[in-house]
Image: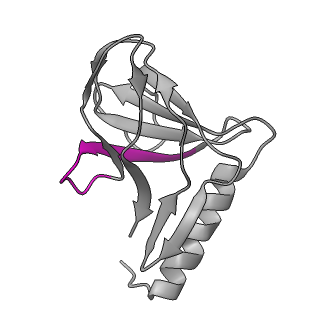
């Protein structure tokens, strides 16, 4: 295990942000149902997909990267959200994330984890943090 200074954490997060930004197509945050696999493992059921802005880095401070504003998306399949995955514009897996409701310490915060096909879906907040 290593201990990182805030400067090192923030530099690392900036690099992750640039990897998310990479590619000619928009990067995608997939909202998933089912059990989260081992890092980068085969995904489960995709309930919705958010197209991410060209620059995902909203701010980086105190060892956390807050995402830029992400537009709403329409739910493709009804279900219970359990985790999320980001792939960049080249289709490369970048990061798997926990998803929770307000008050949780999850990376992706949603108002409700039970979502319904056809509904508009918004993120309350999204961040990466050490």
Q: In front: 72, or 5?
A: 72
Decide: is 32 above or below 129.
above
Going 39% across and 16% down the picture, which residue do you hit?
119
x, y (%) of residue 12? 56, 72
Going 46% across and 28% down the picture, which residue do you hit?
42
Q: Quadrant of the N terminus?
A: bottom left
Q: Toward which corner of the image does residue 118 lie, by quadrant?
A: top left
Say how many tags the image has.
0
x, y (%) of residue 84? 41, 38
Q: Quadrant of the C terminus?
A: bottom left
Decide: is 49 above or below 101.
above
Q: Toward which corner of the image does residue 2 lie, by quadrant?
A: bottom left
User: Is residue 68 shown left or right of residue 35?
Assistant: right
Residue furthest left as drawn: 103
Q: Toward which corner of the image does residue 18 lie, by quadrant?
A: bottom right
Decide: is 110 above or below 31.
below
x, y (%) of residue 61? 48, 77
Specify whether residue 95 is painted magenta.
yes
Q: In front: 26, or 44?
A: 26
Specify whether residue 14 is painted magenta.
no
Q: Magenta region: which residues? A: 94-106
Say whether residue 37 is visible: no
User: Is residue 120 shown left or right of residue 53?
Assistant: left
Going 28% across and 17% down the picture, which residue do you hit?
79
Say whether residue 79 is visible: yes
Residue furthest right as drawn: 24
What colour scheme does the image use?
Answer: one colour
x, y (%) of residue 38? 38, 41
Q: In front: 49, or 68?
A: 68
User: Is residue 23 shown left or right of residue 53?
Assistant: right
Q: Give the overall secondary structure of the magenta segment.
A: strand
């Amino acid at each position: 295990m290593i201990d990182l200074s805030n400067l090192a954490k923030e530099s690392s997060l900036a690099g992750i942000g640039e990897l998310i930004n990479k590619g000619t197509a928009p990067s995608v945050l997939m909202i998933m149902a089912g059990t989260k696999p081992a890092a980068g493992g085969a995904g489960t059921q995709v309930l919705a997909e958010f197209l991410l802005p060209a620059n995902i880095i909203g701010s980086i401070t105190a060892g956390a990267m807050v995402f830029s504003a992400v537009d709403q998306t329409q739910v493709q399949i009804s279900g219970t959200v359990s985790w999320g995955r980001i792939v960049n514009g080249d289709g490369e897996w970048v990061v798997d994330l926990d998803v929770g409701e307000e008050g949780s310490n999850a990376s992706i915060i949603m108002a409700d984890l039970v979502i319904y096909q056809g509904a508009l879906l918004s993120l309350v907040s999204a961040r990466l943090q050490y």
